[in-house]
Image (cartoon, rainbow, N blue to C red):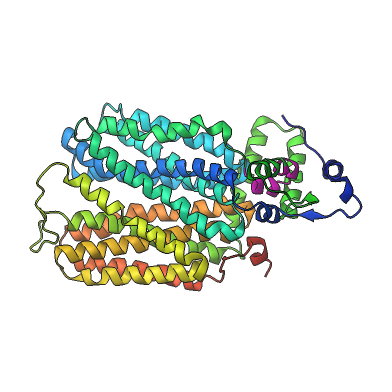
Amino acid sequence: MTPRISSGEEASLLGNQFPEMEGENPVYTLDEALSAMKFGKYQGLVLAYAGLGWISEAMEIMILSFVGPAVKSQWKLSSAEESALSTVVFFGMLVGAYSSGILSDKYGRRKCFFGIGVVTSGAGLLSAFSPNYISLVISRCLVGVGLGGGVVYLTWFLEFVPVSYRGTWMVVFSTFWTAGTILEAALAWIVMTKLNWRWLLALSSIPSFSLLFFYGLAPESPRYLCMKGRTIDAHQILEKISLVNRAKLPPGMLVSDDRTAEQNEESSSAQDALPLSVSSKMTTKFKSAFSSFFMLFSPKLVWTTLLLWVLFFASAFAYYGVVLLTSQLSSGDSKCGSTVLQKEKSNDNSLYVDVFITSLAELPGLLLSAIIVDKFGRKLSMVVMFILACAFLLPLVSHQSGTLTTALLFGARMCVTGTITVGSIYAPEIYPTSMRNTGYGAADGAGKIGGMVCPLVAVGLVTGCHQMAAIILFEVVIVLAIVSVLLSKFETKGKHSKTMWMH
């Protein structure tokens, strides 16, 4: 175990490193160091690892579109049992999102990566060998728990990126999700027509195993280390960044942006030094881990937290709703009196082709958000794209031609993808570093609830021949999202969370 270094020893060490600065004692913060070194090759490597995590998550989510129908046919499942395969994944993700956010803020981003990789890859591979329905449901629920930790990859990556670059690179990061959806559709197209769903589950777990393979190369977040008062460790990572990026660190000594966090770390160290029993220590750490979650409901944060939850719930509800709505309205065997998108399914590949093409709608959504996020700010960007999504969906209150329906749903998915992308930038930026993963993880959990509720409510209306009611419900939910954004008092573009919360 690395011995702890006192603040006085730390200052002495850094003073020796910069002897010409001993008298003046200049200091710099992490944000100043990252801004000086800019976005370089080191951040590119961080992006690759975090992006692989999101590819893994997207593939495991998209696989539900293919495995459910195949298992239903092979095991003669009911529609409710087929739906449960999707529901348990979202339930697991809900648990994973909350727990990983709390644990990563307490024990570090890097330690969570190992747990996420083991659970996701192990359960994903085991699900391919499920002997019956119950074992498949349990294994897919465990996969969901691992997938819920995907929020940690996002916040970890953003903590290496200079503030002025976050908007653009968050959009670039989101392309990994789209790549995962397209890759899974292509993989299903190849595997399902020649082999079976078990092969698809096994092959889809490869990205998760890859995360474990490269785990040793992933560094801890320097922002997390600064938050814990471990500026020596953070400085060592910054030196590696400067070496790889061929850029110079600012002269002087690195100081933490959060002095309170450093004091908390020292307090925690003092507690650890007490001769407590193992059970007492575990209880103390358990309470400490959940303290950041309860802080989300403090008078200063509760309004922001609730508005963010509404935003994420509505965004996920709209996203998964549009995806599932497309498959419902594209069905050629609709039981309703009037069908939309009357397609004759001429071959068994049609499902995979349709999902592949639909996934491409996310690319212009990412491009749109990249263009406007840093130009107009986070709040205005989300409002504009939500309004456009409403405009695309509104004509669908009545039945339209097949071509027009496809175009409208394509546009709606494009805009909702854009809002989710910007929301994923906004959420980590709006919270202080000490509870960033907890806050974002909780908001992402609210989004998972939206994903669970959507098929049961909105899509159920469509299958029950109540298309107008379903579209109106989508419009109402999106309007709630717009209101939540407008009521939020923070615009995070180009600002530090610490500065925002000082006012």
Q: Position of residue 77 (x, y in %)?
A: 19, 38
Residue 69: x %, y % from top left: 20, 41
Q: Is residue 118 visible?
A: yes
**Residue placed at 24% from the left, 36% from the top?**
190
- Can residue 89 be seen at all in this image of the molecule? no
**Quadrant of the rendered image containing residue 209:** top left
Instruction: Name the quadrant containing residue 385.
Output: bottom left
As drawn, is 82 to the left or to the right of 94? left
Rendered residue at 41%/55% (across/down): 447
Q: Is residue 299 above or below residue 131?
A: below
Taking the image as shown, residue 63 lies to the left or right of residue 283, namely left
Tell me residue 329's x, y (percent): 18, 58
Q: 271 or 220, which is in the foreground?
A: 220
Q: Is residue 215 left or right of residue 351?
A: right
The magenta stretch spans residue 272: no
User: Residue 222 colored magenta?
Assistant: yes
* Residue furthest to the right: 23
Per the picture, the main secondary structure of the magenta-coloured stretch is helix
Compared across the picture, whether 488 is left or right of 383 comes to: right
- State which quarter of the image contains the N terminus: top right
Read off the magenta span. 221-235
In the image, residue 192 lies at what x, y percent? 22, 35
Q: Furthest residue to the front?
A: 246
Q: Is residue 79 above or below residue 306?
A: above
